[in-house]
């Protein structure tokens, strides 16, 4: 059984909510575990082994290395694309863009569905603008 959760982050202090918001979300997370309350939600736990996820999301995967650098540093996807956010660091990493933040365990991943068109900058931990993400119709 899959549950859908929307993670929303405010301008100054991030917040997690499961209630609908007035604006269109940039991304939604598909999770098999409930989202806890707090500043940043942990990334969902997936049943798919890492090697299978890499194969499934070939062409729609963004890796973040141990220096928090995005590989590649510019990405373009269509609205509705599911993207694998892949943490290749030995430390838990926070990836944020739009109104959402994802806490991804060391060498873990999460899958995000891009639901809003626009140009977004992505942050990794305290590093800003490590990726430019273009979401197009």
Image (tube, rainbow, N blue to C red):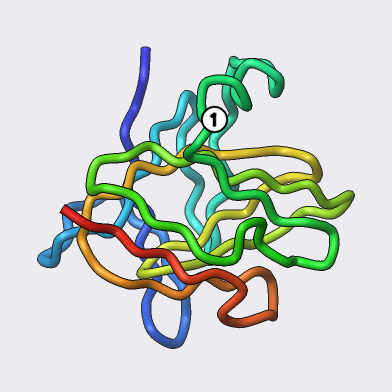
Residue 88 left/right relative to 82: right
Q: Residue drawn at (79%, 40%), measured in percent from left and top?
A: 107
Residue 83 left/right relative to 123: left
Q: Nearer the viewer, residue 80 or 108?
A: 80
Q: Residue drawn at (70%, 19%), measured in percent from left and top?
A: 51
Residue 47 vertical position relative to residue 26 in the rendered view, above or below: above
Q: Nearer the viewer, residue 103 or 37?
A: 103
Q: Residue drawn at (38%, 37%), measured in percent from left and top?
A: 82
Q: Position of residue 80 (x, y in %)?
A: 24, 41
Q: Position of residue 65 (x, y in %)?
A: 78, 56
Residue 136 vertical position relative to residue 110 in the rendered view, above or below: below
Residue 88 left/right relative to 43: right
Q: Position of residue 89 (x, y in %)?
A: 83, 52
**In the structure shown, which secondary structural element does the residue marked by tag 1 occupy?**
loop
Residue 33 left/right relative to 28: right
Residue closest to the far right: 90
Q: Residue drawn at (46%, 73%), measured in percent from left and top?
A: 14
Q: Quadrant of residue 93?
A: bottom right
């Amino acid at each position: 059984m899959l549950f859908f959760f929307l993670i929303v982050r405010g301008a100054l202090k991030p917040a997690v909510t499961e209630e609908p918001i007035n604006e269109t979300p940039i991304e939604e997370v598909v999770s098999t575990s409930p989202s806890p309350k707090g500043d940043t939600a942990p990334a969902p736990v997936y049943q798919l082994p890492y090697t299978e996820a890499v194969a499934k999301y070939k062409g729609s995967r963004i890796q973040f290395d141990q220096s928090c650098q995005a590989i590649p540093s510019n990405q373009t996807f269509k609205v509705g694309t599911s993207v694998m956010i892949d943490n290749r660091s030995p430390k838990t990493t926070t990836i944020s863009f739009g109104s959402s933040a994802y806490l991804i365990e060391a060498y873990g991943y999460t899958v995000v569905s891009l639901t809003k068109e626009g140009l977004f900058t992505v942050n990794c931990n305290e590093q800003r603008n490590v990726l430019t993400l273009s979401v197009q119709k």
